[in-house]
Image (cartoon, grey):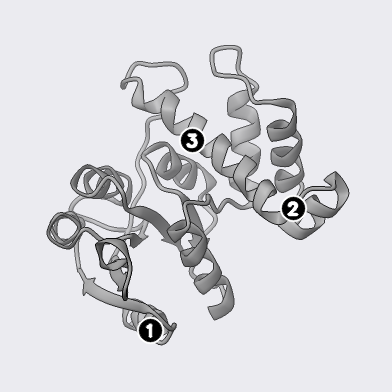
Amino acid sequence: MYRRALAALLRSYPGWVVVAEEDSGLDASGAALRLQPDVVVLDLELVSPDGIETTRRVLAACPGAGVLVLTRFGDDRALFEALCAGARGHLHKGAVHAEIVAAVAAVSNGDAVVGPGVARRLVEFFASPHTERLSSREAEVLNLVAAGWSTADIAKVLVLSAPVVRGHVTAVVGKLQAVHRAGPDGPGTVDGPAGGTRPATSRRRGSRRGRHR
């Protein structure tokens, strides 16, 4: 029921087309390979396989896709692992319609979407001597996200534009993923399960690759 409501919401947004709804991680990766979507909205509680492994498989099948993971509870560790696996952001299932649309649009544009809990984990991760250091500005932005500041407030206090703030967060997530692409035994590699159920993919009309979501 949640997936169908989500698909209906995305279909109602001008220029977006939902091209598939799938019941399992295996079906999701198959749809990603076949349809090459721009965005995949993926439940972290998926089974067969779980949401973390499904994220990896979807991105292996469609490297250009932006994966947005959904969860119904605040499992920051699993969300952090999803980012390590290549997801660009996450959203809680209780988010209102405007938040969902904004998150999908951000991921479609290549931005990262992270909340304070995950940002705190990122701060701790990059504090390790074994990981790549953040720039002073990236660290400043990330600490403010971890403190619960909005993008608009961060932009105002640092005298930056909102796109620049989002760009710093995206750069941090990119560095995180680069560490984890180095190999399963590389520095900072995280292990542990996640879970997930029912992704939706869609397409935006009239642009490169059909703009799938």
Kind of residue sitting beneath label 1: Ala
Q: Give neighbour class at mark 1: few <14, some 14-19, many 20+ (Cα, 10 Å).
A: few
Evaluate if marks 2 and 3 touch, with contact meaning CB atoms under 8 Å apart.
Answer: no
Give the image quarter of residue 156.
Answer: bottom right
| Residue 75 relative to residue 155: left or right | left
* Residue 186: % across, % down: 38, 16
- Look at the picture and state if 20 lies above or below 56: below
- Look at the picture and state if 107 lies above or below 128: below
Instruction: Report the quarter where the N terminus lies.
Output: bottom left
| Residue 154 relative to residue 39: left or right | right
Kind of residue sitting beneath label 2: Ser
Label 2 sits on residue:
161
Q: Residue furthest top?
A: 129
Residue drawn at (55%, 55%) of the image: 74
* Residue 142: % across, % down: 69, 39
Mark 2 or 3, which is nearer the eye? 2
Q: Give neighbour class at mark 3: few <14, some 14-19, many 20+ (Cα, 10 Å).
A: some
Label 3 sits on residue:
174
Of 41 and 118, which appears nearest the observer? 41
Mark sitting earlier along the chain (3/1): 1
| CA–CA distance in space, label 2 to label 1 | 34 Å
Label 1 sits on residue:
5
Secondary element at image label 1: helix
